[in-house]
Amino acid sequence: MKSKRVEVKLSLPVVAPLLDVIRELSLELEKTLAAPQALHDLDQEFRGAWIDELLQGQNDDLKALLALFGGEFFTEGVVSFDETNAEPIVRACTAIRLQLRERRLKSLSDDALETGDIDMEGLDEQVRKAFMCYLFLATVQELIIQHLDSSIIGS
């Protein structure tokens, strides 16, 4: 059986500045979970091991996302999704979007973030860039979910 692969051509001038935001947040997430876990009921040693394992998984997912934007992307503007990277990329997009929401987009309501109904001209450049990154990652997630077989995404 042939594996399903989706290739998407992206605009380098539009996406390249967003990669700076993604890389910066990936660095912030190396030691911090995007969705912190309370886990107060657990023994301290077990809790530490659990969080370390979650962090390792999150970092692996972020590496998969960043790997999309390697040489092929910068020479041809193409990113590819397949059964080996789809699920980690969806999770990494979620982690980055959670960080954007918590750290860079707090001034925007959840409703505005989800509908995209925002006056872009009224935002300062950093918030505008963060919002564009938020929308870009949502689009990546939607592409994966719409175009790849559901069995690839772990259902």
Image (cartoon, rainbow, N blue to C red):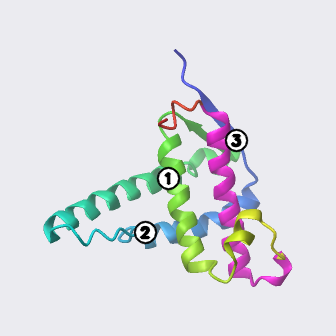
Dot 2 or dot 3: first in sequence order is: 3
Residue 93, relative to residue 153: is it above or below? below
Helix, strand or loop at label 3? It is strand
Element on which disc 1 rests: helix
Q: Residues within 10 Å of mark 3 (few under 14, many from 20)?
A: few
Residue sitting at x 55%, y 76%: 102
Q: Does the magenta stretch include residue 3?
A: no
- Residue placed furthest toward the top: 1
Quarter-of-image position of residue 16: bottom right
Name the side, left or right, on which 113 lies relative to 41. Answer: right
Between tags 2 and 3, which lies in front? 2
Label 2: which residue?
A: 29
At label 2, counting other C-alpha atoms closer than 10 Å, the crowd grade (few under 14, some 14-19, many 20 or more) is some
Q: Quarter-wise, where is residue 14 in the image?
A: bottom right
Span colored in magenta:
120-148
> Residue at point 67% right, 38% down?
146
Q: Name the residue under label 1.
A: 91
Q: Is mark 2 on a helix, strand or loop?
A: loop
Q: Name the residue under label 3.
A: 8
Q: Distance between the residues labelled 1 and 3?
A: 19 Å
Q: Distance between the residues labelled 2 and 1?
A: 13 Å
* Position of 155 relative to 89 (above/below): above
Please state which amino acid type lies under the numbered disc 1: Arg
Q: Looking at this view, is 85 or 44 the one in front?
A: 44
54 with respect to 134 (left or right) = left
Disc 3 residue type (three-letter) = Val
**Residue 86 x, y percent position in the rendering:** 53, 41
